[in-house]
Amino acid sequence: MPDKSLQPPDTLAGRIDKRLAATGKTAKGASREAGQGESFIKNIRTGASKSPRTEGLRELARVLRTSLEWLADGRGPEEVEPAAGDAPPPDASLRIPLTAHPQKGGKPDLAVRGIALGGKEGDGDFQLNGDALQYLERPAGLINKPNAFAVILRNTSMEPVYKHGWPIFVDPDGRKPVDGEDVLIELHGESEHEPGPAFIKTLVGRRGGQVHLSQYNPPPADLSFPADRVKQILRVIPYVEAMGLGV
């Protein structure tokens, strides 16, 4: 059921409520779907978030099928058509609940680009050299993502969320990660043509010219890299999303 505590229609919170009602979504559900944490809309309503990040509003606008301009200040189109990448794949009706094994949804053409060893820099994290080490059967949620790939985690630094031997899915064409999300971060190599080390970590934030990260097991006192050393940061696709299951 959509939330009923509607806000004044000429405010950001009011426009959000209008789109929640139009799409049949709840505030918590839409916040989670936008990748912002379930209190994102609540914080806007209560004033705890006076200036929400543009990236967060952009993702919320996508979830609510509206434009960022309309959501932010009432200008621009209120309703927009979903992007082609948002459309469910044609086999959506065939999906089953998530199990310990990836739900197969496509051909065995999902490339494994690196073997992740985890830990601190220099401890043997993987490199993305462009070669496919092997191929996996493509999970249902990645059928319409031709450039998505996997890496295989080979340590316990991200347990209990990601276990040793599990595939980690990323999509270079997907949305940019926000603070608090798990990411694949790749650093520049020592030379222009040499791949640098890459890691699976949690993005804490970007400040002071540094990219700050964390891991689950064990949590480090500090884990950061100079921003100019970072080649790319890719959002890790959660398993439920990769399997093509609704949330």
Image (tube, rainbow, N blue to C red):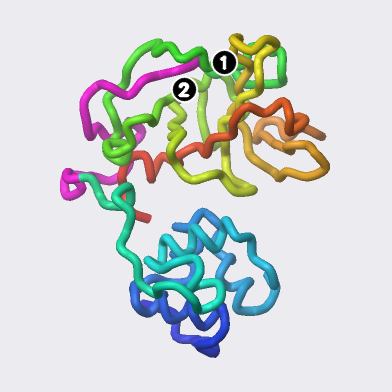
Residue type at mark 1?
Answer: Phe
User: How crowded is the residue under tag 1: few (<14 C-alpha within 10 Å), some, or many (20+)?
Assistant: many
Total numbered labels: 2
The secondary structure type at the circle numbered 1 is loop
**Label 2 sits on what residue type?**
Val
Q: Secondary structure at mark 2?
A: strand
Q: Where on the picture, by quarter, is residue 186? A: top right
Q: Residue at x 77, y 30 (%)?
A: 226
- Which comes before the other along the chain, label 1 or label 2? 1
Q: Position of residue 231 (x, y in %)?
A: 63, 27
Q: Is residue 185 above or below residue 36?
A: above
Q: Which residue is mark 2?
A: 151
Residue 111, located in which quarter of the rendered image?
Answer: top left
**Does residue 22 show up magenta in the picture?**
no
* Image location of residue 6, percent across then percent down: 49, 87
**Which residue is painted at 61% across and 9% down in the image?**
194
The overriding secondary structure of the stretch rendered in magenta is loop
Q: Is residue 198 left or right of residue 242?
A: right
Q: Residues within 10 Å of mark 2 (few under 14, many from 20)?
A: many
- Measured as percent of width and height from the top left, residue 192 is found at 64, 13
Work out how far the residue at label 1 is from the one at label 2, CA to CA, in angstroms: 9 Å
Magenta region, residue range? 90-115
Residue 157, labelled with which disc?
Answer: none
16 w.r.t. 205: above or below: below
Q: Residue at x 58, y 44 (%)?
A: 181
Q: Is residue 109 magenta?
A: yes
- Is 210 above or below relative to 2? above
- Quadrant of residue 2 within the rendered picture: bottom left
Query: Residue beneath label 1, please?
Result: 126
